[in-house]
Image: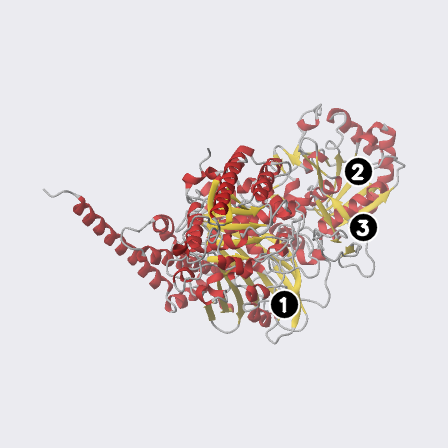
Amino acid sequence: MTAHGEDAAVGPAADWVYRESSADLRTRAVPYSHLSVELGHLYMEDFTAGPDRLRAHFAQVAPWAATARSLAGPRRRISTCFLVDDYFTPFSSPAEVIPMVVRAAAKAGLRIDYLARESACAEANGARVAPLLLARLVEEPPVGTASGTRPPAAESGWLCNGVRSRSDVAPQAMSTATAWEPPLELGARRHSVFVDAQLWSTERDGRRLWSCPFLAAVWQMLRLGLLRDRGEVVLPPESWEEDAFPDRWDLLPPVVRLNPQATPFWAYRTFSVLDTRFLPVEHAVRVILDHTAADPVALRQVAERSEKEGLAVPSRLTERILYAFTATGTEGGGP
Amino acid sequence: MIVFATSDKGGTGRSVTCANIAYRRALTGDNVAYVDFDFGSPTAATVFELGSAVRAHPGGGVHSYLQGRTAEPVRLDVWSLSEREALRGSLRGAGRLCLVPGDVGGGEFPADEAVTRRCANLFLALEEEFAVTLVDLSAGRSYAIDIALRTTARPELRDVVTRWLVFHRWTRQHLEATAALVRDERGILQIGAHWGHEQDALEGRVRYVRAAVPGIDLPEQDTGFPAAGHGLRPEQKEWLKACDAELTRRSGKLGLGRTVTLGTVPLDPVLQWREQLITDEDVLMPQIANRETAEAFQDLADGLTDESRWETL
Amino acid sequence: MTGASDDGATLVMVGEVRTGLLMNRLPLEADAVAELLDLVPGERVRTRERPVPRAVSPDTLYGVDCPLVTRSGGRVRAIGTLAARACVVGGRVVQGSTRGVLIAGGDRRLPWSHYLECPGVVELTGRGTAADVATRFLSSRDPESLDPGAVSEAQVARLRAARLLDHRPPFHPRRTRLRWSAVVDREGFRGAFTLADRELRTLRLTIARTAQATPEQLAALCEDVALHDWLLTTVPAVVDSACGTRRGDADHGELRVVIDQLLHLWMPGTDTPPGLGEIWDRLEARPGLTRQWSACVRRVRDHLALRTLELLQDHRAARPPG
């Protein structure tokens, strides 16, 4: 998270330069579409409801996708993506699911350019992904924080947008008891909407299970092209050359390019059409992203590219993310 | 090295003895830190005569630090800040002597993970700059002992040498209570095992200090003070000797015998009236304190790192 | 966040560096150091082998919202993030270094994401310029005001707790703290280096804009000064006590550590970009750091020669005649 990736051994007008490769740090750039449109997010309960449900879903999504396309303007690069849950409750197989989903989308006139596995937002091919975002979270200091050394969300597993009502301080013997104080949203105008989002939980066997909001935040950061792992691009899309898809999710690349002519997966802005049951999840995503200090070099790359095209991309991450919430009548709650 | 000092009951002179041990140790050239973990009544500042220095940093003591109210507890350099003239200006060859005080008016509080982590940070930070860190814990089954056991079981403190000194007076009641504090249910060894210490190894790191022991046989001319046996009838002297022998037998039975006793501090009139550091000046000119007391403190100070006295038996 | 090349804007920075001995019996190898400093997933540790091995961790950000006092005594509010990192030199000396660029802010606190767009920048609201605040920062004793020192301490504490270390330092030197402020302005170079007490040092710098110093370069410079100040605080003290012991009493453990592990770390000016070289020139003139160091090193060598002579004499005396 260096503010500058500069090498101290080089002066402004140097005729002699000494460099060591271990001090040389470069960050890869990626190409960008103007807009990344998410056409849906498939969980087991959606799948078991059958292909009709899927068709109904895409029929709902299609007008929104068309609106987004027209709002983006003429000659804009727009790519579409679709996310499948193989993290919380894995179901079926790519060989069965992918053709079904692609057919249902086609019936509504939609084309899925990229298909991604939700588990990839946690880790992929042995490389960690979710921890990359966790490392970038910076908690908001309450008034009176001189050094911000309180234990960060990275340890507690919870992130909030203000000050919690529970006191962090254990009560002392023979001290005057403090009255209960309500939580407080920092930066609220008059009244608070206080959110305390769980980022992960720990399974009985000690494994860490990332929460849906956290993986969704990772997913947004991936689509915005802002995650890097030691300077390398995280989860670059891969093509699947064979005729049939594999029968296990872990044999499928984390992000698959289904359409060889698709514009880039990464985009300046994202637009997602989601069922209303995901509203609290996305609120948590926005809280997470409002507390994310993205890689400054990646941010600069986006700014430079968009400026070259004569576009202005909002500096605030949550202003690059747009939604439409629909109700397709699903009964189940989130995962 | 971190040395924890505790006792089951108050009145053992634990704090003043530890302060004197720290003083003697610093004179030999080691950097020494004294941490006042006596949460119920932090009073070490009095012994070092650092009262105004402590008051100049309200909310900067160990209580505030462990509870997350301050980023770092204050460290007071005794040589430069003590109000006692004899301590001002460090002697040649002496190491640093610092007090990490408790908060004025601070009280006991339970430990949680955050408190333990901060405690571990503090101990490691002191271990970095000080060869010996003496931690004065509250008496009895206190939160302070709990925090100490829980913290020293953490992996980051696994490599640091930690030792325990349990103080007791030379009476039957003290012996029984002390044995219970160490070995009984919810005692030091059991709680230590609960937090992850290996019980036998922990027991090997515990030694006892017999405090405020009245001398029976010391002839008057050596001490300049009437010995406890002075002016007693022969029958009374015999009775005292028998008591002493009985206590010695009992201490052996309870596991507080000579082999696990690091040292003995005699009853000293100066310390009965005033808890203070006994310097060499106090012993020599004028002869206010007993030479034996100063020697006992020196012996304890040396004993902290005398490996032969810490070998497991 | 851009550097000094902002037209019309002066760059004002404050920070604090804490320096101490790594809690390990022997100096760490380069791979172990890289692992130790790998504190931020997805970011890289920067390492350098020559002239002296040095490794720097990636930055971690800490949010702050606290008062600061200006030179005139007024209070401003500081909101933003401090950037902190840890460095290890020669596998032996560890530093926690925190910095913040001070700029003028608005009247109210803005949504937090605004402050995250410029990492390591602190916005000041209220009356008073950043330069006023920087001046007062060095002498501030207010526990509630901005405390980069506490953040630096947190960085060092993180390393201390690492399982990689054996936590048996070969000796127990005092840590030092260097509190610094830097103002990049139109005028030329000015500065003051003060030893406030046994632990605290302050460095006040005013640098010309033509030096084109970036915040990161200024921080690296202060880390370099802090390192050499620590060496100069630690080594002469050990040499003093070794030379002061009586013949036969000498236990040269600490002196040996100093000779084997610390003497070769003296390399001032390595991390200083050409535009800021003037600082070292001034420090070498007054008080003359390298001059003092060289004298100390000579003293060590002479003392060892003397000790060798004594040992030979003792040996000869112990041998029976004939």
Quadrant where the C terminus of chain C is found in the figure: top left
Gap between marks 1 and 2 measured at Cα: 49 Å
Q: Residue at x 73, y 37 (%)?
A: A113
Which circle, 3 or 1, is nearer the viewer?
A: 1
Q: Crowdedness of circle 2 by 10 Å Cα count: few (<14), some, many (20+)?
A: many
Residue C68: which numbered mark, if any? 1
Residue indicated by mark 3: A71
| Whether label 3 touches label 1, CB < 8 Å | no
Q: Crowdedness of circle 3 by 10 Å Cα count: few (<14), some, many (20+)?
A: few
- Above or below — where is C66 with respect to B166? below
Amino acid under disc 3: Leu
Instruction: Please give the chain letter of the residue carrying mark 3.
Output: A
Q: Position of residue B57 (x, y in %)?
A: 59, 64
Gap between marks 3 and 2 measured at Cα: 20 Å
Q: Crowdedness of circle 1 by 10 Å Cα count: few (<14), some, many (20+)?
A: many
| Whether label 1 touches label 2, CB < 8 Å | no
Q: Looking at this view, name the residue that lies furthest to the right.
A: A329
Which circle, 1 or 2, is nearer the viewer?
A: 1
Amino acid under disc 2: Gly
Side of C287 where B177 appears, left or right: right
Task: Decide which of B115, B199 is in the foreground and name it.
Answer: B199
Mark 2 lies on a secondary structure that is strand
